Amino acid sequence: MAGRELYICVCLAITMTLTSCDPVDQGELHVIHKRQAPGERPSCQTGATVPATRVDTTSRLQAIRSLFPNVPGGAVHAYIVPSTDAHQSEYPADYDLRRGYISGFGGSAGTAVILTNKAALWTDGRYHLEADENLDCNWTLMKQGIPGVPSITDWLVDQLKTTTGARVGASPFLMNARTWKSYSEKFAKSGISMVEVDNDLVDQVWTSGRPAQPNSPINALPMEYAGKSWDSKIGDVRGKMRAKGAAAYIVTSLDETAWLFNLRASDIAYNPFFISYAIVESNRVRLYILNHAAKLTQDPTDEATTSKLYQHLSSAMDGSCTSSSGSCVEVLGYSPIGIKAAVTDIASNSSNNIWVSLLCNQAIYSAIPEAQRIHDKSAIALMKSKKNIVERDGMQASHNRDSVALITFLERLEREVKAGQQWTEVKAAMELKKERLKQDLNRGLSFPTIAGSGSNGAIIHYNPSNATDKQITTSDMFLLDSGGQYLDGTTDVTRTLHFGQPSDYEKECYTRVLMGHIDLALLKWPKGLYGREIDAIARAPLWEAGLRYLHGTGHGIGAYLSVHEGPGRISLSHSLNPSDQALEEHMYFSDEPGYYEDGKFGIRLETIVTIEFAQTAHPFPNSVFLGFKPVTLVPYEPHLIKFDMLGPKQIKWLNDYHKRVEEEIGPKLSAAALQWVKARTMPISYQTTNSATTYTHSVLFMMGAAVVSLMSLR
């Protein structure tokens, strides 16, 4: 799923989540329109059509500006609103969508900055089109990464240069400490102060229509899906703490608390998380959750488990824990202020060193004296990303069921579109969701389905709505990016289709994306490389023709966790990201190059792959090589492929992949879906002579398509 990844933190420029690895690649941006002040935006010109998704923020801006003079400690002259929550989540709960409320922009990544007389929003290349449509004409759109667009700090320094004693405010709970520090240092050089506003200004003005704070039931994940007990995981964390000399480790990321304690919930849409913090010490474990008293004794709501929360965590019914060895979990009420107080209390003993991850927010970070602070990579993220054998089996099983759902849907969609039945993007998203819900162990979607027909496919993170809904026809490309959550895995797959006669140019673009997709899947590399060191492999066929895409090539993916997972990622943009990790066996990533033309079409091909030890023809001393194995098993679109552009290795990979699809997924399909697959998985014959290269798949594909058409008439 392009962009909603795994991990940008260019701390001198813009606040971005570190839990996604396919945000915009700073090194891969073509020069398009730079920043656009309201007077420069075409849709803000006199007589221009107002986009249906635009949000009027005039009264909201007036309300927040009215609070500037009354901030404790002195008035502020600007206010920064990031996208994240107190846990630096990539996708916060609806309750925490503060930046979305104040700006009207609905994308997952971006930062709003409000001055007394101006407002600007920074977002990356995935969202440039969407932001322009969402933002009303109070806002300047800053297209992050485009040459000439200033960083947040540079822009604010310029805007406030004539203001004596200028102060820039932000909530310390909503910004990670590294970004806070970089902003503060840059502002200080120009005499500007960065000030903590504990009572967030957006919270003060968002008093009407705000969603309730999430409070979903929490269920234990059985060992048959988790593969490792929570107390064993705690033991691993403590081992890392001892190696670091840490008396306590503060768990701040929601995916980490869910994984660590083998618990799942639904506080965050599409992510099985619950709002929480945790503190691990050598002889004590604390878990902070909302409405803890009721949840401890609540009956499980997932049929897969029979344990109540207090039973699963070996605590008393009131959440207390009498064990002196830390073999049970003490469950307490959640509050950001409360966790900060607990951290402060631990730090009151000057011999206690406290470990917080690079994603830790400024409020918790600043509660730890510098001499006692270990600010480093997460103790949990790498362990979580390397799946155990049970998780690996579950990932393949869940992807197989998911492939059945997607193939079943695509066969019906193509058949009915070609028959003239009306299909729209919204209908496609709804019907595909129904297919996934039919599958065993499904627990919903892993993200909102991206179903883009024609020009909507060029919007990288497009979400179909009634306001933007387009018909799916035989005339346009159709990009479908979707995924599901299962008790045994998380899925994410993208296929691009055309149900009519694509142009030669569309076929060339699709083929170049496919070539890069295959080339990355074929790669073998020496263990120790980072994803950024292999990312260009997927881009090379596009670069050869002068084409580019604006997102990362691969993000990690969780096991019934987040659809975007770190700490590894495959993206050119992460050379400055200190949380980045080398690629290791048993990690799972997306392989998803793409190509997009504004107003015309979008192409993306995404297959989840896992890293395995690779066999090589020649051993090299003291070297281990790694490679990818596909996990997603859904065929590609043959009549969008220019077979004469493919090389022998690419053709062999495609034939081998399609053979796996037919053999492993075929037996699970209906007769009609199986014939649809067979028409797309016929082997490609490749013969080279002195005078010509011959490809026979096209004729076979047309014959297979004819068979499917005849069967559909029966």
Image (spheres, rainbow, N blue to C red):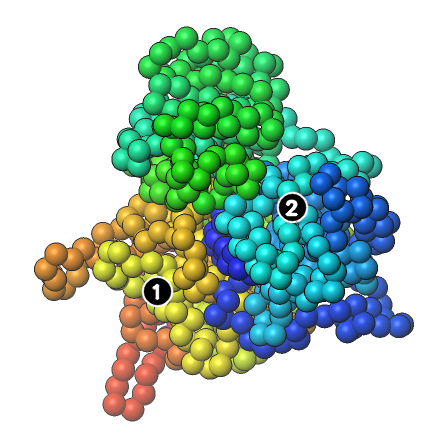
The residue under label 2 is 195
Q: How far across and down, in percent of the image, does residue 639 sit? A: 49, 70
In the foreground, 625 or 614: 625
**Residue that protrudes farthest toward the bottom in the picture:** 691
Q: In this view, does 201 lie to the left or right of 553?
A: right
* Position in image of residue 518 (x %, y %): 37, 65
Position in image of residue 537 (x %, y %) = 36, 69
Which element carries disc 1, helix, strand or loop? loop
Tell me if residue 377 comes above or below residue 654 in the rendering: above
- Could you tell which of marks 2 and 1 lies nearer the N-terminus? 2
Q: Residue at coordinates 68% horizontally, 48% vertically from top-left?
A: 169
Total marks in image: 2
Residue 14 is tagged as none
Q: What is the three-letter code of the residue carrying label 1?
A: Ile
Horizontal arrangement in the rendering, residue 490 relative to residue 203 (left or right): left
- The answer, for residue 119, to whether it is visible in the render is no
Measuring 48% from the left and 53% from the top, which residue is drawn there?
7
Q: Quadrant of residue 85?
A: top right
Q: Looking at the rendering, which quadrant does residue 111 occupy?
A: bottom right
Cα separation, mark 2 vs mark 1, equals 41 Å
**Toward which corner of the image does residue 267 lie, by quadrant?**
top right
Q: Quadrant of the C terminus?
A: bottom right
Q: For label 2, count other residues whose C-alpha is less than 10 Å away and answer few (under 14), some (14-19) or many (20+).
A: many
The kind of residue on which mark 2 rests is Val
Q: Nearer the viewer, residue 644 or 556?
A: 556
At horizontal 48% and vertical 11% (from top left) the residue drawn is 320
Residue under label 1, please give it.
Answer: 534
Residue 39 or residue 648, whichever sits in front: 39
Say whether residue 10 is visible.
yes
Q: Do the residues labelled 2 and 1 touch (CB within 8 Å)?
A: no
Q: How crowded is mark 1: few (under 14 residues within 10 Å), some or many (20 or more)?
A: some
Element under disc 2: strand
